[in-house]
Each structure stands twice: as structure tokens, then as C-alpha cells.
Amino acid sequence: MATLTPNSEQRLNSAAALPAAIELDGINKHFGPVHANRDIHLSVTRGTVHGIVGENGAGKSTLMSILYGFYTADSGTIRVGGKAVTITDSRHALALGIGMVHQHFMLVDNFTVIENIVLGAEDSALLGRTLSKARAQLKQLATDYGLEVDPDALIEDLSVGQQQRVEILKALYRGADILILDEPTGVLTPAEADHLFRILRKLRDEGKTIILITHKLREIMAITDEVSVMRQGAMVKTLTTSQTNPGELAELMVGRRVLLRVEKGPANPGKVMLAVDKLVVTDDLGVERVKSVSFEVRAGEIVGIAGVAGNGQSELLEAISGMRDQSSGQVLVNGQPVSAFGDDGAARLREVGLAHVPEDRLRMGLVTNFLEWENAILGYQNDYGQGLGLDIGKAKAEARERIAQYDIRPANTDLKSANFSGGNQQKIVLAREMERNPDVLIVGQPTRGVDIGAIEFIHNQIIKMRDAGKAILLVSVELDEIRALSDRILVLFDGEIVGEADPATADEGELGLLMAGVHEGHEPDAAARLPEHVTPVEKTLTEMSPKTDRDIR
Amino acid sequence: MSARVPLPRWVDIALLPLLNVVLAFLIGGIVVVMVGQNPLEAVGIMLYGAFGYGSGFGYTLYYTTDFIFAGLAVSLAYHAGLFNIGPEGQAYVAGLGVILVALGLNGQPWLITVPAMIVAGALFGAGWAFIPGYLQAKRGSHIVITTILFNFIAVSMMGYIISKILKPANVGSDESAPIDAVSRVPQLRLFWDLFKNSPVNISFFLALIALVAVYWLIWHSKFGFAMRALGHNPTAARYAGISNAKVIMITMALAGALAGMVAVNNVGGVQGRLILNFVSGAGFVGVAVAFMGKGHPIGVALSALLFGALYQGGQELAFSMPGITREMIVTIQALVILFTGAMGDMLRPPLERIFGPRAQARAGDV
């Protein structure tokens, strides 16, 4: 990382004379009594990567929505390139050279890449000329920035990382000079994230300005030149990245000292609680996604399944938890074989003591239109009340208890679940599944899109469950999370378990090679390499890599 | 483009529908002016016809009964994410069940026949709705298509049954043999003089009970919980171990049973026989009623009353105002459906500007 520091300082110094790419001055935004942005001052230097960090609900997204014309500020001025402007809508923002890459992609799945790129930016009713112009421009962008995507591929056939590149290309095609990326790595595999960072560096070096919204401090440390921290709607501080460290940033974000590592004692494995025997699972199209997988999870241990997303993890989780039929093989919970056939298999697995925190809480774990208390009993609704009636009083009373126990905010059982932040939604799911006292707990991506403070809490809860003698199967695409929490690591590649590792001794490079299918080991880019770990136990949670700030310098 | 904000509840469920109805009447008023009549006078006649005297009010309640059942049949299914357009056919087939038990028990006192008619109507309606439910659950055939087609099948099938099988030899028109007066569903005029010359019968109270029962089922029962989970998010329902197929089939059967009560009101309570096409569109009005009532039993009750009043008041208007034909009444009814159903959200953006910020504040959303 030694090369980054002088470069970024040079960049900051040389750009100081020019007007800032974006300057926000005293921005205020209220939603009723909620003061979402309080007197925000922010200056983004041209040609830099500027990180904005903060917990969910800190006001990052509101601020960027103001910048992109989704909302208008109640007061304050926005200057783009030194000129005061009032941004009325996203078209206006684009005209000013501000482009945004949303966390959830806005692409038409059954259109090709090039059709998506010109969509809404057609020159005339006849597409021919626009398309050939776009094709030439795409080729140029691809060579300039390393943004290679097949222009004629259908979006639905592309990986998530490639789809994100299309989003970036869309913004660049429309002449964006300033790119806002909202949580861009939330959906990416580590390799894809590295690739993205290479692209972002290239864009910066070519003079583009990048605003990166994230809550992963490791990314902030790795790629940004400056970083601004937001907390409860206010801009707490703007720092030069090379002069700060993850600990300081975390403290600024949360407002208190945060323990950035998982503390856990040695595992104490007991008898086998979950056994998976030669399990074969096919996806909806009949393609075999899990190919004869066998493993065991014992009481009191956490088994982590590492792997790049899309190598059969989702199908494996769904088959074990009863959401998907098993093509062949067996799942035994507590020694009992469980059949998951039929579309209510999940209910049978709950009965035998298996709880499941799903990978995708919005699609699976929650009904976002339900009130908090309704989601707090989802899957266990038959335990509330005798006969046909639902005992709402009991459900709400328990929901209130969980809210207090897990510090779910706002503490309101009658609020729609969609109105909770990601971290609090995850806590609703975790509380529901953990407090049933299951024998086996299956956890998929427990901290995806979750704040630092909540990550710490969630990890501690998982460790607590282990120490209470539960068998835990953890699946995560965050290798750091797997290494920090697991007692044993299994690597899943192309639906098969290709290796097992002890997290205390495993070498990250080796694991990476396993995850990539060994022979396909990709050329590591020195500049994109993130800092190495020392030992997993000492590893920090969010940035996870640098043990102290000294490691970064 | 700003984020969509929820309106305060009272605006959403009371003010917005009210404004929609007012708008429909304003445009309907223009139609009345165009044929050279006074629209205020027309409204007066309609209101008097629907509520002003006992017999008229009785008719209004009779229509309302039909619309409550049909509206509930659509609303209930809607909470499970199913768009049931089939109450028309479900009610029609239920008529067969009602007439079969009624003729079988003919001559027995109504305390015996009415419960039997209710059960038979419910079973036949449920059976007819179960088939599209099964096809959706097990075969993936879209419920909208199948329920529409099942309306047509019902029409042809019932036409054949009524005219070829049930019609007694000595009767000229296409209808079944009549039920004895003692075995029919008692009309309210037997107990209240107010309702003399009107067909409203104790099915009306059955409708009120159904409203409460459906409310309880949707929001206070385990099955309702499963149903709503499925309606909002089938994947989450599956995650929760809720059998999608089972819930779909049961929900459709329940919806069909509700639609079947239209037959109890009509065949058992008014005609005393099964006549060709007795449902006469009540099932389709149910779709409009459910949408205007936003799928909530209270909303269904209110919009069913509105449509009941429109039906009865409209007939009164066509009768007593020269130049106003039956077709123009249908036009006004169509306007109400258009403004409350299809364009029901037209006034939402301006209302959001007026009430939006407050609503957003309440949600505490950042």
C-alpha cells in the first residue's frame, strides 16, 4: 500500500487549485420531524475517489439522492465545478455530468447490453444510428477503462459484476464526469470487487471523480483518497484516507469504540447434529447445482462454507432448510432423516429443530409488507394460539421482548418491516430464528448490507449460539467473515466440496485458489490486492484486514 | 421523482374514494345535462329511490347483499395474491346446489332448508372455484384466465342443466320448479312492515356475518396469516414452510363458497326457483366492489352499499325521469367503476402533495 499514499496526496495537492468537483454547503433535508441531513458541508476534489461512510440511516443515501436530483434540499447550496446549481431531476444531474450507479441495478433483463446503454438516450426514433454510435463509443470506453462487456450479450446472461459494469458504462455513455456508486460491492464476489476497484482507479486516473458510498472500511482504506464520515444525518468529519485508520473511522461512524474483531474461545464439538449425505440438488431449470455433497456439523461448532457466489451455496442452503427438493442423498437432523419434499418442507425442518437465517432477507426472510410483529413469527405462526385463531397478543408480547433483547430500532411492533434499516431487518430475522432454541442453525450471508455496530452484535450472537452447544452452518461469500467465525472451513466450487481447511492455519491464497477451482487461479493484480491478515482471530470485522493502522502505511 | 409516501389512513380509505365517487357523479351529471335534464333533480330521485322509502331501501339492501358476497369472494382471494374474476360463474353454479337441496327438502320449514341451502351453495361455489385454484396451484395455469373461462363454462353448463334437465314439462320459460313458500329464505317484510314489496331477506344478515368472518379470517387467523404471507411474497411463504399450493386451493374454495351465497340470496330468497342467468352481473360488480373497497371488509360493505344504491336508485331514475334510459344508468355505474377502480389512484399525487409530508413523518422513514 506504500504506493498509494504519495499518489493520493499528490492528487489532492495538485487539484487544490481547481474548483472542487462538487461542493455542498449547508445542506438540510427534513422528512417531517426527521432531520435526515443536518447542515452538510462537503467538498469533493476533482479526480479523486471520495468515500462516504456511515451506518444505515446516517443520511448517506439521502444526501446522494439530493445530489442526483431525487430529492430537493430544504436549504443549502450545491456547486458543481464551482457553479451553484439547483438539481431538479436525474436528467438534470446527468446534464451536469453526475452519474449514479445504484445498489440495485436498473437494467432491463431481456435487453442486450447495448440496448440498455442507449435506453433513454436514443438520438432519434430509429435506433440504427444510435446503436452504431454507441457501439463505437463502448469500444473506446472498454479500451480506456478496462470496462469490457460483450455489447450483444443479454443482461440476464451476465454475472452481477458484469451487470454493474454495464451500469457504469451507462453513466459514462451519458457523459458522466462524476460517478456516484452506492454500496457497489454489496453484491460482488471478492474477485469481482477487485476488478471493480481496478476500474475505479483507472477512471480516477483519467480524471473522473468518484464518490463511493459504502460501509466496508476495508474498501475505504484500499481505494479512496479522502473519506467523509456521516452519523445521524450530520457530517462528522472529512479525513485524508492515508492519515486515518479503520478503528478511528468506525468510532466516528458509531459514536463509540467498536470492537473490530471476533472474540471466541476454542470450539467444543459434541455429537453430530446435522449430517448431509451425498446430497444432489438441481435448480429450477433442472441443472445440477449441488453434486453429491457430504459433510457433518457437530453440536458446538461453526462450519463455514466458503465459495464464490453462484457455486451452489444457495441451492445447498435451500435444500437443507427444506425449501427445495433434494434430487438424491439425505439430510439428517439429530440423526433423523428429513424429507423435504413438497412445498412445505421448511415447516417440517423447523419442527425437528432446524432454524434458517436466509441469504436474502428481503426476498425470503421477511415479508416487507408485514408489520414487525408479523415477521417476528413468520414460519412459527402455528405456535401462536389454539385452533384456527392467531394469538396476536402473545405474538406482540414476544416481539417486544425480542426488540428489547436485540436492540431493534425503532422499537415498534406495529411498524411495517420495509421501514426498518437493513441491519434491523436482519436482527428481526436473527432474533426470530435464534430465540427458538434450535438444535441446528443455518446462516446465509448474516451481515450482508449490515452496519458495523450490528455486525459486531450479529457475530457475537452466532458465537454465543455455538457456545450454547448449537450446530451452526455458516455460508458467506465474505471470506473474512468465514475465517473469523468458523471452526472448520469447507470450500464449495461448482457444487462440490473441493477442500477443507482449519481457519487458524489456512492460507488465504490457498483458499482463494480452491474457491477459484484451483487451476483457474487468476493473475493477482498487485495494486488491487487488499492488505493481508495476520491471524483470523485478530482480524477485524469490517475492514477485517489491517490489524492496526501501521499495516496500511 | 420522489419516493412514494403513504397517505394518512383516513385519506386513503375515506377521502380518496369519496372524491372519486364525487368525480364520477360530476361527469355523470354532464351526461344528464346533455339530455336536457336537471342533474340535481336526478341525484335527488336516485337518493330517494335508494333510501327514501321502505321498499326502495329494501331493494338497495337486497342488491347490497349480492355485492357484499361477490366483493368478499374477490377480496379474500386477492389477499392471497389471487385475482378471482370468477364469482359470476361460482354464484351461478352454486345456484344448482341451492335448488337441488331446496327441491329435495321442499315443504320443510325454512329453519331446516335454509342451512341446507347455505351449505349446498357454499359447496357448489367452492367446488367450482376449487378447479381454477387447483390448476393454478398444481399446473401453473393463470387464475385470471381460468376463472374468466370458468364463467363461460358455467353459463353453458347451467343453461343446459336448467333448460334440459330442471325445467318441468309444463313451464314455458327456462327455469326450475318453484320452492314452496315455507321453505324459502324468509324475507324481512315478514318481520318488518318497512320492507314491504321488497325482496331483502335474511341473507342480508348472513352477508354481515360474512364480513366479520372474513375480517377475522384475514387478520386474526393462522390461515389468514399464511394467506397474506403468500400474497405479499411467495418465496418468503415457502421459506416459512407455508404450502403455496394448499393455501391457493383452500383460498379459492373459500372465495367460491362466499360467491355461492349470492345464490342463497337470489334463488332461495327471491325467485324461489333457479332461473336462467339469475346472477345477472352481480359477480362482476363484485370485482369493482372489492377494488373500490381496497379488499377490506369495511370498504367492501361501503362500496357494496354504494353499488346497491346505484342499482336501485338508477332503476328508479330510469323509471321516473323522461330521457334517462336504462343504458344511461349503466353509463353512470360504469363511470363510478372507472373512477374508483381503474383510475382510483388518479387523485393520489395531488393528495400526496397535501397530506404526504405528515404521513411520511409518521412512518419515521429516513
Image (spheres, coloured by chain):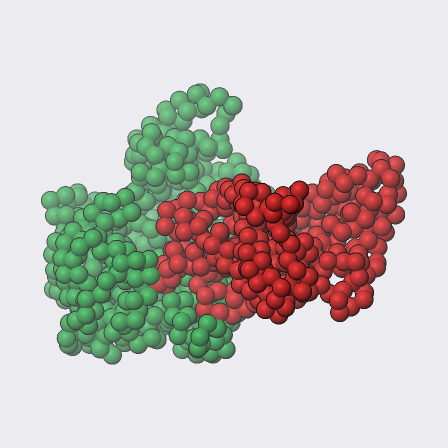
Chain colours: A green, B red
Q: In the figure, is residue B315 to the left or right of B97? A: right
Q: Position of residue B181 (x, y in %)?
A: 68, 61
Q: Nearer the viewer, residue B63 or B219?
A: B63
Q: Nearer the viewer, residue A394 or A483?
A: A394
Q: What's the residue at 17%, 61% (across, down)? A: A330
Q: Position of residue A208 (x, y in %)?
A: 40, 40
- How many numbered marks have been drawn onto this rendered protein structure? 0
As displayed, is residue A127 above or below residue B122? above
Q: What's the residue at 66%, 43% (across, down)? A: B173
As displayed, is residue A170 above or below residue B233? above
Q: What's the residue at 46%, 32% (across, down)? A: A119
Q: Quadrant of residue A28?
A: bottom right
Q: Nearer the viewer, residue B66 or B163?
A: B163
Q: Quadrant of residue A177?
A: top left
Q: Position of residue A231 (x, y in %)?
A: 47, 64
Give the quadrant of the N terminus of chain B.
top right
Q: What's the residue at 22%, 65% (across, down)? A: A338
Q: Position of residue A111 (x, y in %)?
A: 39, 33
Q: In the figure, is residue B77 to the left or right of B113? A: left
- Residue reaching furthest front? B170
- The answer to whether residue B131 of the structure is visible from this angle is yes
Q: In the figure, is residue A134 to the left or right of A543? A: right
- The answer to whether residue A447 of the structure is visible from this angle is no
Q: Quadrant of residue A110?
A: top left
